[in-house]
């Protein structure tokens, strides 16, 4: 809820409006997880609130810390579901990778989140609780958010938009939209809808191939939305929002990393307000895909750059702790439990 909504809900129960501000500060500034912590509230009121307005929160099931400072969490949600969350340390601060769904139904062949299928959408409160619990666990302020964990955010559109509004709210954690990235595998109608909101966030689009032929073999969503239509929606998005799009491109050895692929990608994106992020694919157990060699990635980047497009190679963080999409939850599901292993 926003502060205004809490104030309204309290007034319907004849609770004074200054209490709404107090509770809101406890929840969003001091990261309280229960009304019992709110010691400046009368005991009776705390009891009433816990019955009328239960607080959504998750619990830490597992925390792993990698040598590079990356932290990976497996958070348990109500109902016994697990969501993964990664906290990455950068020069500019802490960035958190949030899950938007339990599992995923997009079926990208290199991604672990999709292997056990889709279970359910996460609520706005469940997405917020990942950020708050991770901040509490790390003891550091989180300044950036990437919606790149488990799930397809644009398939859980309303909840994700609500989460974005709450987390960027001044009375809440107040994370600037400019510090938030949302990644999609390319749901064209939803990209069009998002453009109309004129949010200042960064839209990342998982392209991973320069044409439908290759994209069809690794991303089932590509059969529904052709690359032509996807890039058309992206162009429209940049025109409507004036925000640069970031294209994600996982480098799969022998699949999408040839010089011809680089040329095709460059010529398709030429002139667009965009950036390309190359990611040597993280190996997932039983997956047939291997990462391209550093030399191949460098050569590929060089070709794309010739088309006037800015290219970066994503730094690998936390690969010693399975810190990529769905790998922890998968281990927990397939092995029936894993050891809590903090420290790498
Ligand atoms: N569903 C959204 C966001 C979740 S995944 C999307 O598809 O964009 C976040 C990013 O990680 C996506 O670009 C996804 O394609 C990529 N990804 C998934 N598995 C990966 C792997 N094994 N190695 C490298 N990148 C991967």
Image (cartoon, rainbow, N blue to C red):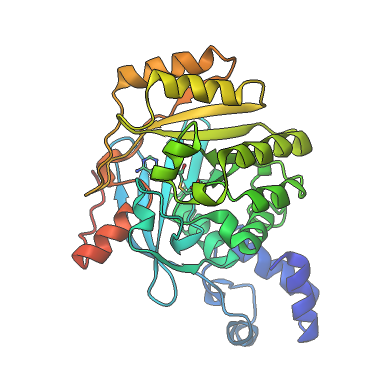
Q: Quadrant of the N terminus?
A: bottom right
Residue 179 seen in this snapshot: no
Task: Name the residue located 77 percent from the left edge and 48 percent from the top edge.
Answer: 196
**Residue most extreme to the front:** 213
Is residue 221 shown left or right of residue 8? left
Kindly indicate the quadrant of the structure image that contains residue 316: top left
- Does residue 85 sit above or below 269 in this rendering? below
Foreground of the two, 266 or 141: 266
Kindly indicate the quadrant of the structure image that contains residue 102: bottom left
Is residue 292 shown left or right of residue 59? left
- In the rendered image, residue 48, in percent from the top left (x then y), is placed at 63, 87
Task: Name the residue located 54 percent from the left edge and 21 percent from the top edge.
Answer: 266
Task: Name the residue located 61 percent from the left edge and 41 percent from the top edge.
Answer: 230
Task: Name the residue located 42 percent from the left edge and 77 percent from the top edge.
Answer: 79
Tally of numbered tags = 0
- In the rendered image, residue 17, in percent from the top left (x then y), is placed at 79, 74
- Does residue 253 sit above or below 288 in this rendering? above
- Does residue 243 sit above or below 119 in this rendering? above
Kindly indicate the quadrant of the structure image that contains residue 77: bottom left
Q: Quadrant of the C terminus?
A: top left
Residue 80 seen in this snapshot: yes
Foreground of the two, 164 or 20: 164
- In the rendered image, residue 105, in percent from the top left (x then y), is placed at 45, 60
Foreground of the two, 119 or 14: 119
Name the quarter showing ligand 1.
top left
Foreground of the two, 52 or 139: 52
- In the rendered image, residue 71, in percent from the top left (x then y), is placed at 36, 46
Is residue 342 shown left or right of residue 15? left
């Amino acid at each position: 809820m926003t502060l205004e909504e809490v104030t309204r809900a309290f007034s319907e129960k004849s609770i004074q409006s200054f209490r709404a501000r107090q509770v809101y500060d406890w929840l969003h500034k001091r990261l309280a997880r229960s009304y019992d912590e709110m010691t400046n509230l009368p005991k009776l009121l705390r009891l009433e609130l816990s019955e009328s307005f239960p607080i959504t929160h998750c619990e830490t099931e597992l925390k792993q810390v990698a040598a590079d400072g990356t932290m990976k969490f497996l958070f348990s949600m109500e109902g016994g579901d697990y969501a993964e969350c990664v906290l990455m340390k950068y020069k500019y601060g802490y960035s958190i990778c949030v899950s938007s769904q339990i599992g995923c139904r997009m079926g990208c062949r290199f991604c672990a989140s999709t292997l056990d299928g889709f279970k359910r959408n996460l609520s706005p409160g469940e997405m917020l609780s990942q950020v708050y619990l991770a901040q509490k666990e790390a003891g550091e302020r989180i300044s950036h958010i990437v919606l790149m964990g488990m799930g397809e955010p644009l398939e859980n559109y309303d909840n994700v938009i609500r989460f974005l509004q709450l987390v960027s709210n001044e009375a809440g954690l107040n994370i600037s939209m400019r510090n938030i990235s949302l990644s999609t595998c390319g749901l064209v109608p939803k990209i069009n809808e998002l453009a109309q909101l004129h949010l200042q966030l960064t839209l990342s689009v998982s392209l991973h191939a320069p044409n439908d032929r290759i994209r069809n073999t690794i991303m089932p969503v590509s059969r529904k939305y052709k690359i032509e239509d996807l890039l058309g929606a992206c162009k429209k998005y940049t025109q409507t929002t004036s925000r640069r799009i970031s294209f994600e491109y996982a480098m799969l050895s022998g699949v999408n990393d040839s010089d011809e692929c680089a040329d095709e990608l460059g010529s398709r994106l030429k002139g667009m307000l965009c950036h390309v992020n190359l990611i040597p694919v993280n190996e997932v157990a039983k997956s047939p895909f291997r990462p391209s060699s550093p030399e191949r990635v460098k050569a590929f980047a060089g070709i794309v750059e010739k088309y006037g497009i800015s290219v970066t190679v994503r730094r690998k963080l936390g690969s010693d702790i399975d810190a990529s999409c769905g790998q922890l939850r998968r281990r927990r599901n397939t092995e029936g439990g894993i050891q809590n292993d903090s420290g790498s």
